[in-house]
Image (cartoon, rainbow, N blue to C red):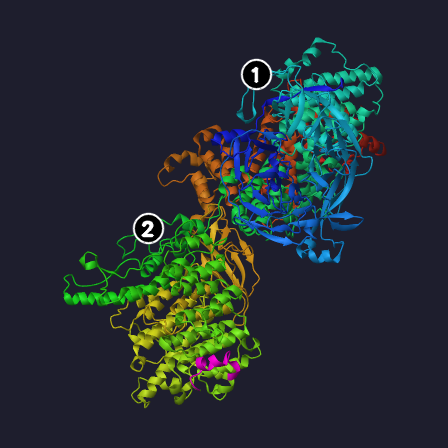
């Protein structure tokens, strides 16, 4: 022990859990707070995302001062804190038994799992909570890498409970496929004290799922892999079989959440066991068949298997602590602390990787023990090294002598002591304690709470101190070197190195925990030098004493401080003495012999190779140049000592100043050429990776998991892939380990991008590379930027500068709560720091726009109070304003559909008594219009508001009053004595509430049942009924359970019951939900048993129930229900319900049609009988003779059927025909059934015209066309083909006096004609719904104008349509037909806001209704038409699927009501069913940089159909897209935005719903990125401002900058434009804008020369015009480097002390040559201009054009290895110039040159040249250098 080095712990302060402080700050504790508390300290990596912890390069230091995280628990409360800050407070329903952090399944974030009595609570880091009820037998929980291990005790009861999780908030957590790496945190009860936390979280109760005793009661362990899944049984492998784990005596004492290991203790056997856990899907060999039957299939399918790999007996009690550490040979070990035996038992693990899976095992006799009272794992000696998934952990042990020892495996490194006195200093949690002294009597009694290198030390007086073994600042260079040696040296060498590193002495490494950066590096360097001395003096006395005062001064600390400012001088002088010492010792031993290969020399050789790999890696990082120089000087020293002259020459060529410390090199053939990463990269570009010498790659770089050289490995990987290397497993053909992200690729450049993503190499890392080295990588990014493949990870698109694609990708893979975090992670990891603020943190969409603009006031022309809530104030957002530009369309729609303000009545200024009657008459007609407005407003505002569920439901008022503008807007109300105002407002209030409810947009989660109940009134009313109906249409009523539904029905409020039924049916559409079905059939008396008394239910309620049944059973063709509905069509209604009988039959017909929608005769075998019965109801001759047989066959209940269906043997066709016709139309929709169509004939004789009602003819036309769907064609010829010849001929000569047609016949012809035309137009509307088809629009518009002219001539019409219809048909019929055509027109143009159509609608609405023909039904049609035209504010449209066509037909049913309460022929509530046919096919483009919606040209391609070939057309976003069934491709086109292509597979499916992860459009948002040099279409619609090059040349004056300066005084007027203003217009890149501002700075212009200013402007123009801002850094770096080199040659000032810039320039030149040779390809040339690089090459060669001094130096170098003496006046400059020459021309080492010349020269004639032979021997050397060598050796023949 005496020989062990001694270190002092640094005491951070006296420790106290911060939870106690947080409790004290929270205030007075509650009375029931227990005294006991518990805490646990853990690593920040525990709760960090997996993606953030994988990359070592992003860590600034292995030991930065990261705060410890703490979990503090008292009773049922938990406080999670980090340092002096509380992160979260959790309050649980019951006391906490145990808590731990665990990553469940594939989740990226850790979850806090808390075990309570009969409950397991899982909280994620954002506060979301899942509560799972568990059995009370659960005793403990433990984290594993793939889930949570749950241990339960044996139960005596017969049943145990395996829980089903219950969610108390929205769905939990995001998912990620990456591996987890966190540090475990488990709480154990052990401490006492008092106070209370705060904040409550609610927990939902779960539903217990019982599993029989023979399954889970037999399992001692359960596994939870996902909080939303059931618990899984754990299995044990015994004798090759898998059985349920029943090891109740095996008490788990430890698990690892990094590797699947578990340790347990069996008290009966007194043995410890180690288990390895495996998850697989193997077939179980269970004990009995009964057991297989009892285990649920979901549990058997996937299970966790535990296999015992070690057991150790002899311990009377369980180990007090178990942890993972690392042996001295880097093998993982499991450590068991046995306190009663006072020893630490360590067991070695063996791991084997098979099929990418790690298999663990332990062999016998692989354990050893250390005496210990306490032990904790710490990370000290190898800070960044890893052992597989584990960090390299050392052990800190409290020995029985009460001293702390640091062990690395079996090797004891040093002894730690507390400082002799503890003074005030830095304290944990900002606490201070008085100065105390640690006397010799105090003993350390405990170690605990180790986090990285920090521990809690408890002394025997009870005090706890937080101590640290090592503290920042640390030397990153020293860390890198130690880590490289840890990863590269063999275990025996590194163990010896550790002993030297941690030994005692003045120069000992980390002798003080607070050592500085410089002292750490100096300590490391001195240890390496000591190794050299030990080798050199292995046979002599070590540490020779300096022989002179000068040497003593050089070795003093004063000289160290004096030389800090001159790095090379410092290094050289520090080394010179040691070199002389070595030379002296070597000469004294034997100056002619090499050093023996002792242990030290081998260690030094391996160290040289490891550290050289670090040296080559540091060369690739611009930010580590100082470290590179320090390491170079040390390596030069080691290489000189080992006699590796090739390495010495390599370092001196990089840093010529090192030559002073080395002196004259021996001319001997080098053992081997040192690896050179620059040379390898250059050869890759010039000749391909196959031709590049693998010896130029340091071996450490190629290996996996070597973190210290990870940077160099990544660059080598990228260059290998760029030059064609192939991937073989996890390595490339060049031997380099690779990690490539998943994604498709076709070119090497695309593969590089995926590799950069896989290696987490972003733009920030790219900027750290030398500029020349970064060019090939920037080339790859630029080549892929234009059109990258789809399906790449979002980070890849960020890397390319395509944030538009990145955001689109993220929105498809993340839910809304994870999106912001995921966006920031991807942007931060891949973006350059100066680009971060450009990227929007939140996703801009209609949601934020709507919420942000809710309070905007829009006045309209009729408004007297702009603040009145009219239900449409939210419609104006950035998207709609962009859609409609600056016109006032939406304002006008809002004015036309507003029912919340009094309407204007035009009267005389001085009213008389008769005027008042006139006002009341006008007011009554206006009231008809006002009450019809809510139906249109519901369509207009459909799904446009995103309400908060904490807000009350607001319904705008219906105001039936008028105002008199002529009398200062005096208000006039309807006279209640004349009109029953309340009666006409009942149903309008219902429709008004429906319209208000339809505003709610589809939510990401569920609608809250609490919110629905919150808005439920005390007394039922029509408003809440309308809300229920609207919520049902949106599908939100699933949150109501059966109890809630029956509570509504118990109110016996007809309108509420009606709205609820229809809403439930719409929500559960097509599901045949049994509970809902029962609710509906209760309201259909036909379902009652014969003995059941018939209830008096209103016919409206029964009609709604019938329609609801059809929706619920849609498409099912349910036989029994079809029979019921068929009977209801012909049911005879007695009593007061006769007036509504037709509406009841129509509802039954629609319901029957929905039930067998589009099924035709394939539905059921009895369909033929159903069809015959329907034709009987229609009145067709085909069904009359089969009347009796059919009725007897189909009757459900014989006693009831005769009374309900038949009136004797006659059928009232006027009642049954509409419903039967509709039923047939829907049943045979799109079936093209000629048989059915032939029976649904249009009257072709005068007798048939008399037999069939004209309005029934319209229904027949609609039915025929729906059946023959494909034959509908938008042409007038097709419409005319629908009209029989007799009718055509009858109306052809209506205005002709010679026409001899009878007046009665003419009237029947005209009646039939207008109804057939209207029916054909409705068919067109349904066929082309939502398509905006131009032919259909033109045809329908022309027919609408034609009918309008027939009513009252308003404009000239063309064509051969018959004139004079109004003479033979009443105006009411013409009005109805006109408005049905207009409705059909708006169905076709739905959501388009078409201006011409809107003008027609506005005209129709404004017509005078005093003559009585423009009634409520017509106004309702106009209102609906306006709503359809602007459906959803222009963001919705209609679909043409079967179910959508059915819903639209219900809405457009061609019987318009006469008043607000008229439900006789068609229930008005059914008019809202259009909602079921809507699709949000709207798309807007959002600029990803600004977050604002913008215009963009969009090319849409639709697939080939039977009517047209594959077609492409252009739209301008925002716009509506075609249906999914025909949509094939979308492409962002135009020159202003980066192209983007979305390829789709046309499918006959509905449009994607909001929040659908498979949607390619992110709920209607497409992110696009504007190119630099182009303005948006809002700012520059024409494109005149985007002439970038002309404008830039004009402002910059590149051709004559001097001339510009002379005339600049005249250009400073108001119209002048500066460079920064122009750049800011075209680019948002902050680096370009800042540089442009610099160019405008007068002080900069006065400091720099004109040539440099001109170059900067040219570069700025290049970067802006080509949208490559990163090239600014590249151009300036190369230009200034060249300028510095030229200035250094021509002056005496030394700026560049190394030749690294030459290597950088050579890589840029190699990139240029690879482009010119075609090895690298690009469609637009290189990213840097080739002539610029060629110019650099010429300048370098001009600088190196051999001067006499350079020739002399070159000659001396080749012959003697002598570098110019840097002590001489020009020596430093000459040595640097020589190094440039050697590097630029690839001159071989002098021994190699001399050897080659000696071999070749004797075989040549005296006059022959050496050049050809030297070119063959040195193919990489430049011909200039070969020529000089030839001259030198030819001219020295006589020497």
Vertical arrangement, residue 347 with respect to residue 586, above or below: below
Residue at 56% over, 46% down? 130
The verdict on residue 965 being magenta is no
Q: Is residue 1264 among the parts visible in the rendering?
A: yes
Q: Principal SS element in the magenta part?
A: helix
Examine the rendered structure and indicate whether residue 76 appears above or below residue 1249: above
Whether residue 1199 is in magenta: the answer is: yes
Residue 358 on image: x %, y %: 74, 43
| Residue, disc 1 | 435
Quadrant of the image containing the N terminus:
top right
> Start and end of the magenta stretch?
1192-1208
Disc 2 secondary structure class: loop
Q: Find residue 920 and report its horizontal and vertical position in percent.
A: 21, 66
For disc 2, the neighbor class at 10 Å (few under 14, some 14 to 19, many from 20) is few
Residue matched to label 2: 857
Q: Viewed as shown, does residue 977 lie left or right of 1219?
A: left
Q: Is residue 463 above or below residue 252?
A: above
**In which quadrant of the rendered view does residue 1316 lie?**
bottom left
Q: Which mark is residue 1291?
A: none
Farthest top residue? 549
Of callouts 2 and 1, the N-terminal one: 1
Nearest to the eye among marks 2 and 1: give it: 1
Q: Nearer the viewer, residue 1643 or 536?
A: 536
Alpha carbon distance from label 2 to label 1: 68 Å
State the residue lying farthest toward the bottom.
Answer: 1300
Where does residue 1290 sit, x and y in percent of width and height?
36, 86
């Amino acid at each position: 022990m005496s020989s062990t080095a001694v270190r002092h712990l640094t005491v951070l302060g006296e420790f106290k859990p911060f939870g106690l402080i947080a409790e004290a700050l929270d205030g007075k504790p509650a009375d029931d707070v227990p005294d006991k508390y518990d805490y646990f300290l853990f690593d920040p990596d525990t709760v960090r995302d997996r993606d953030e912890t994988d990359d070592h390069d992003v860590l600034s230091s292995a030991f930065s001062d990261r705060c410890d995280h703490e979990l503090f628990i008292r009773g049922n409360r938990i406080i999670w804190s980090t340092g002096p800050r509380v992160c979260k407070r959790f309050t649980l329903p019951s006391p906490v038994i145990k808590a731990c952090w665990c990553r469940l399944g594939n989740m990226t974030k850790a979850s806090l799992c808390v075990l309570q009595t009969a409950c397991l609570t899982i909280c994620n880091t954002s506060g979301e909570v899942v509560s799972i009820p568990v059995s009370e037998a659960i005793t403990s929980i433990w984290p594993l890498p793939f889930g949570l291990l749950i241990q339960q005790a044996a139960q005596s009861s017969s049943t145990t409970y395996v829980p089903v999780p219950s969610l108390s908030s929205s769905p939990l957590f995001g998912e990620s496929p990456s591996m987890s790496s966190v540090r475990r945190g488990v709480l154990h009860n052990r401490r006492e004290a008092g106070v209370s936390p705060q904040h409550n979280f609610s927990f939902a109760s779960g539903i217990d799922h019982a599993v029989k005793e023979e399954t889970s009661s037999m399992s001692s362990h359960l596994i939870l892999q996902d909080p939303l899944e059931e618990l899984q049984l754990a299995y044990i492998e015994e004798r090759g079989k898998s059985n349920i784990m029943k090891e109740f005596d095996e008490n788990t004492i430890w698990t690892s959440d990094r590797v699947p290991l578990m340790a347990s203790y069996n008290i009966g056997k007194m043995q410890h066991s180690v288990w390895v856990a495996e998850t697989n899907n193997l077939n179980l060999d269970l004990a009995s068949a009964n057991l297989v039957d009892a285990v649920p299939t979901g549990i058997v399918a996937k299970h966790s298997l535990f296999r015992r790999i070690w057991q150790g007996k002899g311990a009377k009690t369980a180990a007090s602590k178990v942890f993972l550490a690392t042996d001295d040979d880097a093998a993982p070990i499991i450590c068991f602390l046995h306190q009663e035996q006072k020893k630490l038992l360590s067991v070695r693990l063996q791991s084997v990787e098979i099929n990418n899976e790690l298999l663990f095992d332990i062999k016998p006799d692989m354990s050893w023990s250390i005496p210990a009272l306490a032990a904790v794992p710490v990370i000290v000696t190898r800070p960044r090294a890893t052992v597989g998934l584990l960090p390299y952990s050392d052990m800190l042990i409290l020995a029985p002598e009460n001293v702390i020892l640091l062990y690395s495996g079996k090797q004891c490194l040093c002894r730690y002591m507390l400082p002799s006195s503890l003074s005030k200093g830095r304290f944990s949690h900002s606490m201070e304690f008085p100065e105390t002294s640690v006397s010799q009597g105090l003993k350390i009694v405990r170690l605990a709470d180790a986090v990285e290198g920090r521990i809690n030390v408890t002394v025997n007086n009870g005090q706890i101190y937080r101590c640290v073994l090592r503290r920042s600042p640390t030397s990153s260079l020293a860390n890198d070197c130690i880590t490289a040696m840890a990863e590269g040296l063999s275990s025996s060498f590194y163990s010896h190195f550790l002993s030297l590193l941690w030994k005692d002495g003045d120069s000992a490494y980390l002798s003080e925990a607070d050592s500085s950066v410089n002292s750490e590096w100096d300590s490391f360097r001195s240890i390496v030098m000591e190794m050299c001395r030990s080798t050199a003096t292995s046979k002599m006395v070590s540490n020779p004493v300096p022989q002179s005062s000068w040497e003593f001064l050089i070795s003093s600390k004063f000289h160290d401080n004096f030389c800090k400012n001159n790095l090379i001088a410092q290094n050289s002088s520090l080394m010179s003495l040691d070199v002389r010492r070595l030379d002296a010792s070597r000469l004294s031993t034997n100056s002619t012999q090499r050093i023996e290969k002792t242990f030290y020399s081998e260690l030094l050789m391996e160290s040289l190779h490891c550290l050289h790999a670090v040296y080559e890696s540091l060369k690739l990082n611009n930010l580590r140049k100082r470290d590179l120089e320090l390491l170079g000087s040390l390596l030069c020293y080691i290489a000189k000592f080992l006699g590796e002259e090739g390495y010495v020459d390599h370092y001196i060529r990089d840093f010529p100043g090192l030559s002073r410390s080395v002196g004259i090199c021996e001319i001997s053939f080098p053992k081997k050429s040192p690896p050179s990463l620059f040379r390898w990269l250059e050869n890759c570009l010039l000749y391909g990776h196959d031709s590049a010498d693998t010896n130029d790659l340091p071996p450490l770089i190629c290996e996996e998991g070597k973190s210290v050289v990870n940077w160099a490995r990544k660059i080598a990987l990228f260059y290998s892939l760029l030059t064609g290397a192939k991937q073989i497993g996890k390595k490339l053909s060049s031997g380099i380990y690779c990690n490539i992200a998943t994604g498709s690729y076709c070119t090497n450049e695309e593969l590089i991008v995926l590799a950069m993503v896989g290696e987490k190499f972003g733009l920030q890392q790219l900027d750290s590379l030398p500029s020349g080295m970064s060019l090939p990588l920037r080339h790859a990014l630029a080549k892929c930027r234009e059109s990258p493949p789809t399906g790449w990870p979002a980070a890849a698109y960020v890397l390319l500068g395509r944030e538009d694609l990145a955001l689109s990708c993220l929105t498809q893979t993340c839910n809304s709560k994870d999106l912001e975090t995921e966006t920031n992670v991807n942007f931060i990891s891949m973006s350059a720091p100066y680009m971060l603020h450009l990227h929007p943190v939140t996703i801009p969409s209609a949601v934020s726009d709507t919420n942000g603009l809710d309070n905007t006031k829009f006045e309209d022309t009729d408004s007297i109070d702009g603040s009145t809530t009219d239900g449409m104030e939210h419609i104006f957002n950035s998207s709609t304003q962009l859609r409609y530009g600056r016109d006032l369309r939406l304002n006008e729609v809002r004015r036309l559909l507003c029912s919340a303000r009094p309407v204007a009545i035009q009267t005389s200024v001085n009213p008389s008594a008769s005027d008042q009657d006139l006002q009341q008459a006008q007011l009554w007609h206006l009231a008809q219009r006002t009450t019809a407005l809510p139906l249109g407003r519901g369509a207009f505002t459909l799904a446009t508001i995103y309400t908060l569920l904490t807000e009350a439901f607001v319904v705008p008022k219906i105001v039936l009053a008028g105002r008199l503008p002529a009398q200062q807007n005096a208000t006039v109300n309807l006279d209640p004595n004349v009109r029953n105002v309340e009666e006409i407002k009942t149903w309008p209030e219902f429709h008004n509430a429906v319209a208000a409810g339809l505003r709610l947009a589809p939510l990401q989660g569920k609608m809250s049942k609490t919110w629905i109940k919150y808005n439920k009134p005390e007394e039922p009313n029509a408003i809440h009924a309308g809300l229920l109906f609207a919520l049902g249409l949106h599908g939100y009523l699933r949150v109501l359970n059966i109890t809630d539904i029956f509570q509504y029905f118990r109110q016996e409020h007809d309108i509420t019951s009606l709205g609820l039924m229809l809403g439930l049916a719409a929500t559960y559409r097509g599901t045949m939900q049994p509970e809902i079905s029962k609710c509906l059939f209760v309201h259909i008396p036909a379902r009652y048993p014969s003995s059941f008394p018939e209830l008096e239910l209103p016919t409206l309620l029964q009609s709604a129930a019938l329609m609801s049944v059809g929706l619920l059973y849609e498409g099912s063709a349910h036989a029994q229900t079809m029979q019921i509905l068929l009977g209801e069509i012909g049911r005879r209604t007695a009593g007061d319900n006769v007036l509504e009988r037709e509406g009841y039959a129509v509802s039954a017909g629609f319901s029957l049609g929905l039930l067998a929608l589009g099924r035709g005769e394939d539905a059921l075998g009895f369909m033929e009988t159903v069809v015959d019965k329907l034709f009987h109801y229609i009145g067709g001759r085909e069904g009359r003779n089969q009347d009796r047989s059919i009725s007897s066959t189909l009757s459900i209940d014989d006693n009831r059927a005769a009374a309900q269906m038949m009136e004797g043997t006659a059928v009232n066709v006027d009642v049954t025909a509409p419903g039967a016709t509709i039923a047939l139309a829907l049943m045979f929709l799109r079936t093209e059934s000629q048989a059915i169509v032939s029976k649904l004939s249009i009257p072709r004789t005068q007798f048939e015209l008399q037999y069939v009602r004209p309005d029934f003819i319209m229904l027949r036309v609609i039915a025929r066309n729906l059946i023959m769907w494909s034959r509908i064609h938008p042409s007038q010829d097709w419409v005319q083909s629908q009209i029989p010849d007799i009718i055509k001929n009858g109306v052809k000569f209506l205005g002709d006096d010679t026409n001899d047609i009878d007046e009665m016949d003419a009237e029947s012809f005209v009646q039939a004609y207008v109804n057939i035309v209207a029916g054909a137009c409705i068919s067109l509307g349904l066929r082309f719904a939502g398509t905006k088809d131009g032919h259909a629009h033109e045809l329908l518009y022309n027919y609408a104008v034609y009918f309008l002219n027939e009513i009252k001539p308003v404009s000239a019409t063309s064509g051969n349509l018959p004139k004079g219809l109004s003479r033979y048909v009443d105006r009411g019929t013409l009005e109805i037909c006109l408005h049905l055509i207009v409705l059909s027109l708006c169905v076709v143009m739905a959501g388009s806001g078409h201006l011409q159509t809107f003008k027609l609608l506005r005209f129709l609405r404004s017509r005078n209704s005093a003559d009585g023909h423009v009634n409520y039904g017509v106004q309702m049609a106009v209102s609906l038409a306006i709503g359809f035209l602007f459906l959803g504010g222009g963001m919705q449209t209609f679909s043409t699927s079967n179910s959508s066509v059915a819903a639209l037909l219900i809405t457009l049913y061609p019987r318009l009501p006469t008043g607000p309460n008229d439900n006789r022929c068609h229930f008005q509530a059914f008019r809202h069913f259009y909602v079921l046919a809507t699709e949000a096919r709207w798309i807007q483009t959002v600029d990803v940089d600004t977050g604002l919606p913008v215009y963009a040209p969009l090319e849409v391609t639709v697939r080939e159909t039977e009517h047209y070939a594959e077609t492409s057309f252009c739209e301008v976003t925002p716009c509506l897209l075609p249906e999914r069934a025909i949509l094939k491709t979308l492409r962002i086109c135009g020159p202003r935005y980066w192209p983007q292509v979305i390829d789709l597979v046309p499918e006959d499916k509905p449009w994607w719903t909001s929040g659908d992860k498979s949607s390619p459009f992110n709920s209607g948002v497409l992110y696009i990125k504007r190119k630099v040099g182009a303005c948006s279409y809002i700012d520059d619609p024409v494109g005149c401002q985007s002439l970038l090059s002309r404008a830039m040349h004009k402002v910059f004056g590149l051709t004559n900058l001097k001339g510009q300066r002379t005339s600049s005084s005249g250009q400073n007027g108001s119209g002048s434009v500066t460079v920064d203003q122009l750049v800011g217009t075209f680019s948002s890149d902050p680096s370009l804008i800042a540089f442009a501002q610099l160019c405008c700075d007068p002080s900069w212009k006065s400091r720099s020369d004109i040539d440099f200013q001109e170059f900067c402007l040219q570069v700025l123009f290049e970067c802006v015009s080509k949208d490559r801002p990163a090239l600014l850094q590249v151009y300036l770096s190369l230009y200034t480097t060249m300028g510095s080199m030229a200035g250094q040659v021509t002056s005496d000032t030394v700026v560049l002390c190394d030749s690294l810039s030459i290597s950088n320039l050579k890589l840029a030149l190699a990139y240029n040559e690879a482009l010119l040779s075609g090895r690298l390809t690009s469609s637009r040339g290189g990213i840097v201009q080739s002539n610029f690089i060629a110019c650099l090459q010429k300048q370098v060669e001009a600088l190196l054009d051999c001067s006499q001094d350079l020739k002399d130096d070159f000659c001396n170098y080749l012959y003697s290895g002598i570098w110019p003496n840097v002590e001489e006046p020009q020596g430093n400059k000459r040595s640097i110039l020589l190094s440039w020459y050697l590097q630029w021309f690839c001159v071989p080492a002098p021994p190699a040159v001399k050897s080659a010349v000696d071999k070749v020269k004797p075989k040549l004639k005296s006059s022959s040249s050496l050049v050809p032979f030297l070119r063959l021997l040195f193919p990489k050397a430049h011909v200039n250098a070969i020529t000089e060598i030839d001259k030198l050796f030819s001219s020295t023949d006589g020497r």
